[in-house]
Image (spheres, coloured by chain):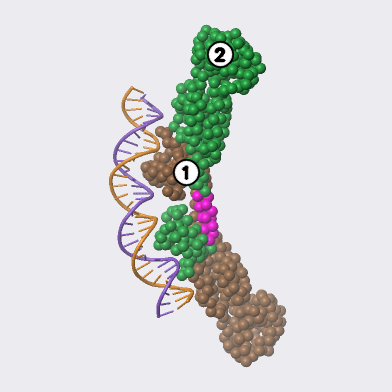
Chain colours: A green, B brown, C purple, D orange
Amino acid sequence: MAVSLRQARAFVAAVRLGSLTRAAEALGVSQPTLTVQLRQLEEALGLRLLDRGARGTLPTAEGLRLAAEFERLIGDFDLLVTQARDVAAQRVGTVRLAALPSIGTTLLPRALARLRERRPGIQILIRDAVARRVAALLRAGEVELAIGTDLEADTELEATPLIADRMVAAIPAGHPLAGRPSVDLADLAGSPLILTDPESSVRVLVDRAFAGQGLAASPAYEVTYMSTALGLVRAGLGVAILPSSAVGADLPGIAAAPIARPEIRRDILLIRRAGRTLSPAAEAFLAALREAAGEGG
Amino acid sequence: MAVSLRQARAFVAAVRLGSLTRAAEALGVSQPTLTVQLRQLEEALGLRLLDRGARGTLPTAEGLRLAAEFERLIGDFDLLVTQARDVAAQRVGTVRLAALPSIGTTLLPRALARLRERRPGIQILIRDAVARRVAALLRAGEVELAIGTDLEADTELEATPLIADRMVAAIPAGHPLAGRPSVDLADLAGSPLILTDPESSVRVLVDRAFAGQGLAASPAYEVTYMSTALGLVRAGLGVAILPSSAVGADLPGIAAAPIARPEIRRDILLIRRAGRTLSPAAEAFLAALREAAGEGG
DNA sequence: CTTGTCGCAGGCTTACGGCCATGGAGTTCC
DNA sequence: GGAACTCCATGGCCGTAAGCCTGCGACAAG
């Protein structure tokens, strides 16, 4: 017969309390139940574990050793179960996340603030990377969740739209275009352009838009980080084309104007591995992210 | 709902084999059974542990961690059960034993040889001590079993007769009494006597016997160890009165003659704590001891 | 001697754990 | 593109186990 945890628990309680009656009470079962469980345990081991007397029970030498070991194992087991339940309840947990750098300036901070307030025990590890790499990280299992843009068809991944990002022109104060409610792509032809890395998804969109208008996108500067681009703009070196999420509001020395013709939109997607359950922590993050996306625009 | 070991085993198997079907086969249950067990485990934890797909199952991140921990715990648990069964089967074990020194020369070695042959894994720890101390060790729980002599009434201890020891005179070769089939106590009056420590149970018996005959037991030498007494005898320094079990047979230079008038008998008892189960190892030792006592006389 | 405590045994009920048969989703291969 | 296969989930059914209650015997204490 196999030895069950229940029997081990019964035995440990009997040893600790020195009485089947009290042990039964502590375990919330009747005393005959405990008698039976202990007999079964002894039969399963072929070993006498307790000496029963009129004043209670005393463990045998081997019983004492077993009880101590069982107690340790049961403690570990219960601790493990408790930890798992904490994870399930989103009290603790870690989400490994990949995100486009542009997300990091507005959407992500809002979502993280909301999450921290609601689920302070959850830790988010962020890998920021360009769209292609974001997808690769996800496929490799190095992250559980990704925020990126449209990806080539991939049965392994599954994307749901999060927000639609509009491209805006970041114009230095004092520039002729500064103060315009919106600009056209053609308006920018006269100014030096600050664009992002050709690897970046933003740049791909921009190039496509220029081509569609019959224009050539010839950047005066090419940078990797959005913050660098904004720095250059502030220094008056040119006009940058960036996603609105990256520009934010009210940057000193910079005027932001949506690009109206053509409107360049970029769908920000939440990407996850198809058929894989999200961790409870990821679910909590996702909820916070959706709220942040819904209100922030 | 509580988490059971069975569920943990099912889960570990599912993770290791990557398939419920194969895990079920490995565990010797049907596949639906495993499905149910895993669902119950997930419900008990409130946590998704496996992603089920058409190609089998893959653990979630938390599931993977849990599986590793469960596997370790289950291994420890099973090891513990195996060890307990080894103890029960007398494959391993330790007996803490207290014995009178006189037992150590004949009866005990025979019993130990027999036991070693039959149960080589059992270890015997021997404390040799005088009768009073033997009982004290037993009462204090420092030993499990004792070989001693009659003790004052004690409800805590329980004695069963093992063998009856006769007192013999150990006579040096060349002594006038040497070669006699038996001697009387009075015969010894003319020789220097070698007796044991007044603490010893043997000495108590000898003193009582002398007193009963109206004689005085005035030892020329008093020693603690029987082997010392025999050494003195061999050196021709006098006659020793010792239990037959201690003298053994055919010691060179020493003739042993039972003491006939009065016959001095000493019951050797096996003493154990009342109401306490003996360990399987002790049972094995006891069986060997009884056989040795039965054949050895 | 009585009383209380303790563990054990028997009888009964419930519910848990198991199997079988079946279904649905997805993959593979021709 | 469809058929066969694989794999997990579901539902119905049954046996056994694990639980409770009542009552008994053993033992210790008053």
For residue A40, side relative to residue B242 (left or right): left
Residue stretch rendered in magenta on the structure: A64-78
Q: Would you say residue A70 sits in the magenta stretch?
A: yes
Q: Give coordinates of residue B258: x percent, y percent.
A: 59, 83
Give the alpha-carbon distance from disc 2 to disc 1, as whole Å.
64 Å
Q: Residue at x 55, y 77 (%)?
A: B268
**Chain on which label 2 sits:** A
Q: Residue at x 51, y 64 (%)?
A: A60
- The one nearer the camera, C29 or A228, is A228
Helix or strand or loop: what does disc 2 sit on? loop
Up-down: is A286 above or below B27? Answer: above
- Going by the picture, which residue comes out furthest to the bottom? B214
Residue type highlighted by circle 2: Arg
Q: Write down the quadrant of residue A254 in the picture.
A: top right
Count of numbered circles on the image: 2
Q: Which residue is mark 2?
A: A180
- The one nearer the camera, B200 or B234, is B200
